[in-house]
Amino acid sequence: MKTKLRKGLRAARRAFNPDEHAARSGLAARAVAGSRRFAAGRRMAVYLPFDRETDTAALIRTARRRGVRLYVPIIVDRRHARIRFYPLEGKTRRGTFGIAVPARKGRPLPARWLDLVVVPLVGVDGAGRRLGMGGGFYDRAFAFRRLRTGWPGPQLIGYCFDCQRTAAPFADDWDLRVDALATESGLHPCR
């Protein structure tokens, strides 16, 4: 079920021509920039896109202008689906799966100390359950959120196009939930 759904949703996001893709990505970036946690001195994790994911270039430029401290996920253990978040500084190089990563790694920041996380996804349902690429990297990195009681932890914003929203049942218990969704039509709370 998930494999077929992923294939269809990935095809939908690839269908945009380059100008449409850039314009829609820019609108999604504007939606994230409206978050209260998108502010100077805050720590935000953002992905560097591949496979025609919603582009984060405009979001990164805006974050730098506002003084937001940027981090990116880097796969540190592929076998056990582990990522760590490193500062986004300087040049990048190709990392695991061909995803861009900083050429020089600084000191990693534990996921729980991020203020805002812009999460890539293939699909998302109305409750904010995320369908990723299938590796479980984000599910594992933010599993602590299922156990929290009082402390809210980082705000997770799914970053995608409206065509990636789905009503198809796919979620498993371990699938990560996002707090909000940023698309070309705005910022949509999920809870």
Image (tube, grey):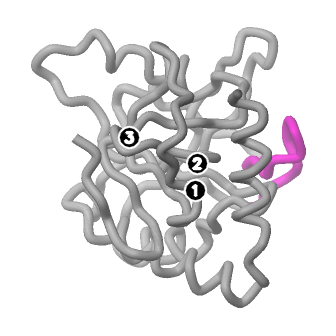
Select label 2 or label 3 by which is in front. Answer: 3
Mark identifier at residue 128: 3
Residues in magenta, as a range: 91-103
Whole-number angstrom distance, CA of label 1 to CA of label 2 = 11 Å
Query: Is residue 89 inside the magenta stretch?
Result: no
Dot 2: element: strand
Residue 9 spot, x, y in % from top left: 69, 52
Q: Residue at x 79, y 52 (%)?
A: 100
Q: Amino acid at mark 2?
A: Pro
Mark 1 packing: few (<14 Cα in 10 Å), some, or many (20+)?
many
Dot 3: element: loop
Which residue is under mark 1? 164
Q: Amino acid at mark 1?
A: Gln
Mark 2 packing: few (<14 Cα in 10 Å), some, or many (20+)?
many
The mark that comes first in sequence, 3 or 1, is 3
Is 12 placed left or right of 61 in the picture? right
The N terminus - image quarter: top right
Residue 92 spot, x, y in % from top left: 79, 56
Residue 51 spot, x, y in % from top left: 81, 55
In this view, the residue in front, 52 or 45, is: 52
